[in-house]
Image (cartoon, helix red, strand yellow):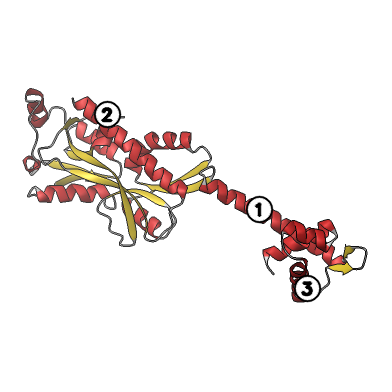
Amino acid sequence: MELRQLQYTLQIAADKNFSRAAEKLHIAQPSLSQQLSKLEKELGVLLFQRNTSAVELTHAGASFVEHAQKIMDAVEQLRQEMSDISQLRKGKVVIGSMPITGSHLLPRVLPVFKQSYPDIEIMLMEDSTLNLEKLTASGKADLSLLSLPLTEPSLSWVPIGEETIDLAVPPEHPLALFAEQHPNERVSLSQLKDEPFIVLKKGQGFRTHTFELCRKAGFEPNVVFESNNIETIQSLVATGMGVTLVPHFIARARRSEFVPAYLKLAEPVPSRTLVIAYRNGRYLSKAAEAFIETFKEVMSILASEDSKNKS
């Protein structure tokens, strides 16, 4: 059974005449009769009673036409929905996000995206870096906001921006006082080798990044506290419990009453690459592509704002 046979049957039933139906379908009448006979043979029933004056539906034909009309209506609705999706009028994208980074960046990205594409539904999934990689690799998330390096080999990624890393120290820390007196001086990571560090718990990508940066500077960080929340870490730093490294976009969004001093690190300034990851070979819908492009645009705006603030 083919969709065109359903269409042919509906047209014959509407016109009750093979010649008129064939004309409207833009096919030859013998071809129309042949297709109907083929369908009736496949079904094992007659759909029409033919006589010299008219073509009438049989009981089986009336039932067939009722169901065929529903099928053709559903097909047309599907075509329209696919057209809507292709033109970005509708759609759904499941976005995985690191809770810490997402809480600071997504409030900037999502309103811009929804303004341009109001009928595209965004579903958010927040989890640790490692779990997000697994969710994305399994297809449970269409896209995920992550930072390099990725550990899951089945993922591809698109870079959306480079984010510098700041140093957070207690306001009364000697390095903070020195920075106040020498605003053009920058702190070297190697100066922190004897400092107590407060870091994220295992499973968070930025924890790994912090350890890698310290090791490149020639030391293993002396971890005194761990937390799942970087805002808690920043508050502990502010009260004098230790120091930490903080992604710049998080450092600049200060939400706590306990605010540490944020210092710039020496050249080459450490940074991390933020990416949108997706499963290798996965088809990216136009809605997903639009989300990636919107994220890139917002990141570019944020970088431009930072440049203006520095000048």
Q: What type is the residue that disc 2 sits on?
A: Glu
Work out how far the residue at label 2 is from the one at label 3, CA to CA, in angstroms: 71 Å
Task: Name the residue beneath numbered marker 1.
Answer: 76
Among the 4 quarters of the image, the one containing residue 135: bottom left
Q: Earlier in the sequence, mark 1 or mark 3?
A: 3
Among the 4 quarters of the image, the one containing residue 57: bottom right
The residue under the point 31% across, 60% down is 152
Task: Name the residue beneath numbered marker 2.
Answer: 305
2 and 1 marks in contact (CB < 8 Å): no
The residue under the point 16% across, 28% down is 171
Dot 2: within a 10 Å radius of its alpha carbon, few (fewer than 14), some, or many (20 or more) residues? few
Q: Residue furthest top?
A: 181
Mark whose residue sits in front, 2 or 3: 3
- Looking at the rendered structure, the secondary structure element under dot 3 is helix
Mark whose residue sits in front, 1 or 3: 3
Work out how far the residue at label 2 is from the one at label 1, CA to CA, in angstroms: 48 Å
Q: What type is the residue that disc 3 sits on?
A: Ser
Q: What type is the residue that disc 1 sits on?
A: Glu
Where 149 falls versus 30 (above or below)? above
Where 51 falls versus 252 (above or below)? below
The residue under the point 51% across, 48% down is 86
